[in-house]
């Protein structure tokens, strides 16, 4: 680390631009975003906080994370992939800005985070979108919110190597306080629905496992869905994605699709319908129906899409027979991370205790409880 960049303290650094960049949850609609389907995420009150300023040192950029006590620097003239995973989110964003012909100058950036890492609540999208929003303001790059969302997604594809959909970046940037987003990932039309869970709260239980399969299996699922679309489109050229396929059409192709591919496609088509039903349920304040759809989503992810794991299944099973929990399911890409539970507020403490005890007996780990609120997307302050 360069001596001149020796500030080790977020509080004492004066930024020209400050950004609050949130993580996200997803109520329902998993693995549908990259299939042009529907999702229902929102940003949460767990965030990455950035301060940025121009350093007038040519092309030198210096980044320091207070939370991880880790820093690095790079030159704008030589952006290449790093061996340290988190640096690639930063480098990837700068790289994508340069590809758009945007002129950056040297800058210093300090950040801190209260988003648990590896919990599947999109610290990566928060990092990418937060930096992109900060640089956009600092250098007046004239990028729209959608430009920032798409640029952050490309950074993840090209520098991090995960072929993610658009849900996480969209939720991190576009959310509104106390609202869920019903997002159509084909048109990017969004409907904001009040996140009215009555006497309930949203409780995440972090399994504290992140199976190494996660990234490779994610990309494999995406390919399996594309394979299904390719086979169906071979006979029906109108079909461009699983969004264009309904249950009847899928049945018609059942014999032509390998069993595994059929199951993947079937899950996605059913999940899209569940998201739309869930939107109606929450608008009608029908938490029971909403919860049923969450459990059905988990079943599909467990058995048809096969992205769950024993730890997630255990925590969902524990919730299932409790009448004070309206719904629970795994959340995010899968193979670890969190379950999301809609639970009556006054029962939370007891349930956390029970989950802690039984999960520890089974897996030798303590699940991490995280209570979250639906919150606003990226917030920008200029000094
Ligand atoms: C990850 C990806 C998202 C989405 C979810 C699964 O969070 O980043 O784009 O595909 O998995 O729903």
Image (tube, rainbow, N blue to C red):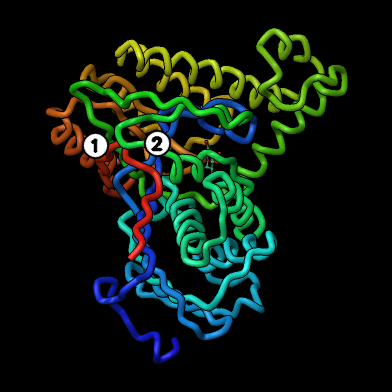
Measured in 3D between alpha carbons, the distance from the residue under mark 2 to the one under mark 1, in whole angstroms, is 25 Å
Q: Which mark is residue 86?
A: none
Q: Residues within 10 Å of mark 2 (few under 14, many from 20)?
A: many
Q: Quadrant of residue 155?
A: bottom right
Q: Which mark is residue 42?
A: 2
- Farthest residue to the bottom: give it: 3
| Foreground disc of the pair 2, 1 | 2
SS for tag 2?
strand
Q: Position of residue 78 (x, y in %)?
A: 66, 78
- Answer with mark 2 or mark 1, whichever residue precedes in sequence: 2
**Residue 377 to residue 132: above or below:** above
**Residue 115 to residue 363: above or below:** below
Residue visible at 67% across and 41% down in the picture: 220
Residue visible at 43% across and 53% down in the picture: 123
SS for tag 1?
helix
Q: Quadrant of residue 159?
A: bottom right
Residue 32 visible here: no
In this picture, residue 69 sits left or right of residue 172 = left
Residue 323 visible here: yes
The response on whether ligand 1 sits within 8 Å of label 1 is no
- Judging depth in this view, the residue of 160 and 74 nearest the camera is 74
Q: Position of residue 266 (x, y in %)?
A: 63, 19
Q: Position of residue 245 (x, y in %)?
A: 70, 17
- Judging depth in this view, the residue of 164 and 227 nearest the camera is 164
- Quadrant (top left/top right/bottom left/bottom right) for the N terminus: bottom left
Q: Position of residue 31 (x, y in %)?
A: 56, 33
Q: Which residue is mark 1?
A: 355
Residue visible at 44% across and 76% down in the picture: 108
């Amino acid at each position: 680390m360069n001596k001149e960049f020796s500030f080790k303290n977020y509080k004492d650094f004066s930024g020209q631009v400050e950004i609050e960049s949130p993580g996200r949850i997803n109520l329902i609609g998993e693995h549908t975003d990259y299939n042009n389907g529907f999702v229902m995420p929102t940003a949460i009150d767990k965030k990455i906080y950035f301060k940025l300023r121009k350093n007038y040192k040519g092309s030198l950029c210096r980044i320091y994370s207070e939370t991880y006590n880790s820093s690095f620097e790079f030159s704008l003239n030589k952006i290449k992939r790093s061996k340290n995973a988190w640096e690639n989110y930063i480098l990837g964003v700068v790289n994508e800005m340069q590809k758009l012909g945007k002129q950056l100058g040297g800058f210093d950036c300090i950040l801190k985070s209260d988003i648990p890492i590896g919990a599947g609540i999109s610290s990566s999208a928060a990092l990418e979108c937060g930096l992109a929003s900060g640089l956009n303001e600092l250098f007046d790059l004239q990028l729209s919110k959608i430009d920032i969302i798409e640029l952050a997604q490309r950074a993840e594809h090209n520098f991090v190597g995960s072929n993610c959909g658009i849900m996480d970046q969209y939720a991190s940037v576009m959310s509104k306080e106390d609202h869920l987003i019903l997002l159509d990932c084909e048109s990017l039309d969004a409907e904001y629905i009040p996140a009215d869970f009555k006497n309930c709260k949203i409780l995440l239980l972090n399994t504290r496992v992140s199976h190494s399969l996660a990234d490779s299996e994610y990309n494999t699922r995406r390919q399996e869905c594309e394979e299904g679309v390719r086979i169906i489109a071979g006979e029906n050229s109108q079909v461009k994605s699983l969004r264009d396929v309904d249950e009847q059409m899928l049945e018609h192709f059942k014999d032509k699709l390998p069993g595994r591919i059929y199951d993947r496609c079937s899950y996605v088509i059913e999940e899209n319908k569940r998201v739309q039903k869930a939107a109606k349920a929450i608008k009608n304040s029908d938490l029971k129906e909403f919860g049923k759809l969450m459990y059905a989503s988990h079943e599909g992810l467990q058995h048809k899409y096969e992205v769950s794991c024993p730890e997630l299944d255990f925590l969902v099973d524990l919730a299932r027979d409790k009448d004070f929990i309206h719904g629970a399911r795994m959340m995010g890409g899968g193979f670890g991370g969190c379950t999301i539970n809609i639970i009556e507020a006054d029962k939370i403490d007891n349930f956390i205790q029970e989950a802690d005890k039984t999960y520890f007996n089974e897996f030798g780990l303590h699940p991490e409880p995280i209570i979250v609120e639906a919150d606003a997307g990226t917030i920008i302050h200029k000094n």
